[in-house]
Image (spheres, grey):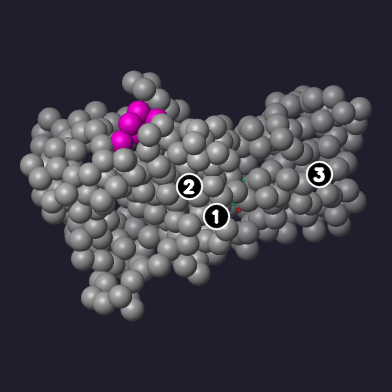
Amino acid sequence: MRRALELAATGPAGGLNPQVGCVLLGPDGSLLAEGVHRGAGSPHAEADALSRVPPGAAVGATAVVTLEPCDHTGRTGPCSTALIDAGVARVVFAQPDPNPLAAGGAARLRAAGVRVDAGVLADEAEALNERWSASLRLGRPWVTAKWAASLDGRIAAADGTSRWITGAEARADAHRRRAAHGAILVGTGTALADDPALTARDGERLLPHQPIPVVLGLRDLAPGAALHDHPRPVLRVPSRDPRAAVAAVADAGASSVFVEGGPTVVSAFLAAGLVDEVLVYLAPTLLGGDRLATGDIGVPTIAAQRRLALREVHRLGDDLLVVARPEGAPGSGGLHTSPDPGTPSTRPTEGD
Ligand code: AOF
Ligand code: ZN
């Protein structure tokens, strides 16, 4: 299952489908094949693994898969019957399928006489697909809002200059988290002022999966904008309404969106109650002035403050990363801190 989880993580995150991996073992425990789901419309992980063995070779095999095999015909056929037809004797899976349209594979496999073991490393599989599962529940893409600020909550100096407030480690962490989302969004103000590339990079190298770049707002992009060089076409949402942006992100096939600014756009998402997680990179510096991370988020008085529950605190070089979620949101409880606040965190900070 650990190997199946590794395989799952190589598939694209933030799409309409979850990340799923599958390992097919012979009756003697030998490795027959591995499979990965590479996004909506492509074969499911089980079908991918089965396609890599000759006919008849999976008779008596065990399929180890990170998600309950589906039992529906969606963009592809049901994995439950594909496994039964291939003669697989045993299926071990981690997470039950939270999609009611696709669930039921375990029952069908058992009814066909296949031994089924559920729940192996389920927490890890659920964590891998947490945003996808949440998007099913929410009926809209998961929204992460991110900003980098000084300790006094400013995102730029008085003249608007902002490069760089946080250090290289914090920026690298933000890039990895970008890549774990299906889309990345800025407003036209930020697109015009900062000319961002909105790619997910490791240094100069593009990470394997690039979120769809989305620009919300009514103004035109500059013809020479760096965004035009993004490996995926830019999705323009000619509106000021975050709900329109979320709907466009869903239509584009993403189940999560990383909102990077600027403060007007972030504030509009917060005011609309459309933020599921906040990532704040805090640098030990002071900027003063009026370039605040957020503007009006609909808090006229202290009784209306937007309390968040801390999820994680990481030290990244000289900076801090605070991950928080609206209080009462599923999974918002429980604070995980870096083991030693005096040293940079060595824990993986991606994905959670
Ligand atoms: C599996 N194995 O690798 C994946 C599953 O439209 P489809 O055919 O791609 O089906 C999408 C649904 O199937 C998705 O919402 C989820 O419930 C399940 N995904 N199931 O057995 C896989 N990716
Ligand atoms: Zn399937």
- Looking at the rendered structure, the secondary structure element under dot 3 is strand
Residue 91: assigned label: 3
Task: Tell me which label, 3 or 1, sits earlier in the chain.
Answer: 3
The answer to whether residue 6 is seen in the rendering is: yes
Quadrant where the image shows the C terminus: top right
What amino acid type is highlighted by mark number 1? Leu
Region in magenta:
166-172
Q: Which-is-in-front pick, marks 3 and 1?
A: 1
Q: Residue furthest front?
A: 342
* Residue 41 in the image, given as x and y percentages of width and height: 52, 42
Identified at 41% across, 44% down, the residue is 321
Q: Is residue 108 left or right of residue 145?
A: right
Quadrant where the image shows the N terminus: top right
Number of marks present in the image shown: 3
Residue 313: assigned label: 2
Q: CA gap, disc 2 to disc 1?
A: 8 Å
Q: CA gap, disc 3 to disc 1?
A: 35 Å
* Residue 103 in the image, given as x and y percentages of width and height: 68, 58
What amino acid type is highlighted by mark number 2? Val
* Nearer to us in this view, 234 or 200: 200
Q: Main secondary structure of the magenta part?
A: helix
Q: Is residue 131 left or right of residue 193?
A: right
| Residue placed under numbered mark 1 in the picture | 335
Q: CA gap, disc 2 to disc 3?
A: 38 Å
Near mark 1 (Cα within 10 A), the count class, few <14, some 14-19 or many ≥20, is: few
Task: Reply above or below: 171 against 290.
Answer: above
Whether residue 259 is in magenta: the answer is: no
* Residue 57 in the image, given as x and y percentages of width and height: 83, 27
Q: Residue furthest top?
A: 204
